[in-house]
């Protein structure tokens, strides 16, 4: 069983030979550039680069040597872009680590040492403070209210950091013949690797509202002026479907998994009642899933942090096949409960190691023991891809990263 076969079999809830593994195929299953630098130094790897492909979250693109070392089974299609040395330049982070940024991204360092990103008309849209690890959104286009019409929504989105500072392949979206080039590169990647392929398409609903209106406002709007929320969501769905049409046509028969992202939970429960989710968000999410299923061979993947136990039945009904990062530290997200109630209906992609207090603070032995306990619950019968709970953060010791993947390799059904 090769890597692609292993991933697809597990998504189809079939028992696999060994636990499938992800590291870096999505922007919620990766590793911070600082942690990656420290890992390579610990391993004595002096060649290659630490290339920050996700600027906002400061995530490194794992190199082939690391993917092979940890037996990773899945790849992000975006890695086929920005592959030449001329596409990158060195920059020293406030932490002192030397990494590389893509040449199209040139933040302005101010007198205090902060890195700032401005829109074409001079608005500060994003900032990474000198002692911070990530960029922070500074501008919300609809902060003062909803527009009368959405003729200029593309312009508004270009002032949101998550859209303006895009990850590959979307940083090349405006290239001539982008869609033909994407297909050619994806086909080449598939032909030269037996790993499964993922493409991230965003297609967020709640998150897009948060980015445009600001989270506190948008969450209140859901209850106080739902008609405005639905008017915005309908425009977003129209845009998402237009994107999905192009994605499915270009790589729907090449890529194995398409990733949506929409954080729906917090520590204690969903960000809204299940009833509100069913009324406002579920039908629109179902439209997106239905389109993918009718026009491609790709499996649908949703990234959502937090306690989403109460929403899982609706997400499954809407057409989501894979959920990530499986935040088992949140309320109602205990592994036994999730596997027992939903293990036959959805694939859990993550949940393999607690990143809040285990991966970053425990000993390597404690990490191993924890991971194996998680695998004993999640892995049997398929429907599981190993990954830690969200990204590996800067404070994680390299010894613990190695111990985590060793535990997966040592695990047997």
Image: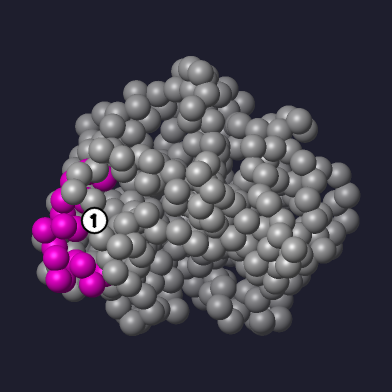
Residue 12 inside the magenta-drawn segment: no
Up-down relation of residue 380 to residue 239 (above or below) = below
- Helix, strand or loop status at disc 1: loop
Please tell me in which quadrant of the rendered image residue 397 appears.
bottom right
Q: Is residue 284 visible?
A: no
Query: Label 1: how many residues lie within 10 Å, few (<14), some (14-19) or many (20+)?
Result: some
**Front-most of residues 353 and 19:** 353
Residue 351 rendering spot, x and y as whole percentages: 47, 67
| x and y, in percent, of residue 226 in the image | 13, 63
Position in image of residue 305 (x %, y %): 40, 67
Q: Is residue 317 left or right of residue 271?
A: left
The residue positioned 49% from the left and 23% from the top of the image is 178
The reply, left or right, for residue 265 in relation to residue 370 is left
Image point (14%, 65%), residue name: 225
Residue lying at 71% horizontally and 76% vertically, measured from the top left: 364
Residue 374 picture location, percent across and down:
49, 72
The residue at the point 24 percent across, 43 percent down is: 150
Magenta stretch containing residue 229, yes or no?
A: yes
Tally of marks: 1
Q: Is residue 166 above or below residue 213?
A: above
Q: Quick check: can you spot residue 390?
A: yes
Front residue (pair 135, 287): 135
Nearest the eye: 117 or 281: 117
Q: Which residues are magenta?
A: 219-237
Residue holding disc 1: 146
């Amino acid at each position: 069983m090769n890597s692609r076969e292993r991933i697809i079999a597990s998504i189809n809830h079939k028992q696999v030979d060994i636990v499938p593994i992800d590291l870096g195929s999505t922007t919620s299953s990766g590793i911070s550039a600082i942690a990656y630098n420290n890992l390579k130094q610990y391993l004595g790897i002096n060649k290659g680069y630490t290339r920050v492909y996700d600027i906002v979250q400061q995530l490194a693109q794992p190199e082939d040597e690391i993917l092979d070392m940890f037996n990773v089974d899945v790849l992000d299609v975006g890695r086929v872009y920005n592959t030449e040395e001329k596409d990158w330049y060195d920059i020293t982070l406030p932490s002192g680590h030397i990494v590389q940024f893509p040449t199209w991204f040139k933040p302005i360092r101010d007198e205090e040492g902060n890195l700032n990103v401005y829109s074409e008309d001079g608005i500060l849209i994003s900032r990474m403070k000198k002692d911070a690890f990530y960029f922070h959104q500074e501008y919300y286009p609809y902060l003062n209210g909803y527009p009368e019409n959405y003729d200029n929504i593309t312009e508004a989105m270009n002032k949101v950091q998550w859209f303006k500072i895009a990850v590959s392949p979307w940083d090349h979206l405006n290239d001539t013949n982008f869609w033909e080039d994407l297909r050619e590169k994806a086909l080449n990647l598939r032909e030269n690797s037996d790993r499964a392929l993922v493409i991230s398409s965003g297609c967020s609903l709640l998150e897009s509202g948060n980015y445009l209106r600001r989270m506190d406002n948008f969450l209140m709007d859901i209850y106080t002026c739902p008609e405005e929320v639905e008017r915005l969501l309908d425009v977003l769905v129209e845009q998402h479907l237009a994107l999905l049409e192009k994605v499915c046509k270009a790589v729907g028969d090449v890529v194995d998994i398409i990733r949506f992202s929409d954080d729906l939970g917090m520590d204690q429960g969903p960000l809204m009642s299940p009833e509100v989710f069913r009324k406002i968000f579920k039908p629109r999410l179902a439209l997106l899933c239905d389109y993918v299923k009718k026009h491609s061979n790709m499996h649908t993947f949703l990234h959502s942090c937090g306690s989403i136990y109460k929403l899982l039945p609706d997400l499954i009904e809407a057409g989501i096949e894979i959920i990530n990062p499986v935040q088992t530290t949140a309320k109602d997200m205990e592994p036994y409960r999730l596997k027992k109630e939903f293990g036959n209906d959805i694939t859990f992609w993550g949940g393999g190691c607690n990143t809040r207090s285990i991966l970053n603070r425990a000993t390597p032995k404690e990490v191993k023991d924890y991971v194996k306990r998680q695998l004993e619950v999640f892995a049997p019968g398929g429907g599981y891809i190993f990954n830690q709970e969200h990204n590996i953060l800067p404070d994680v010791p390299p010894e613990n990263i190695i111990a985590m993947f060793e535990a997966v390799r040592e695990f047997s059904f």
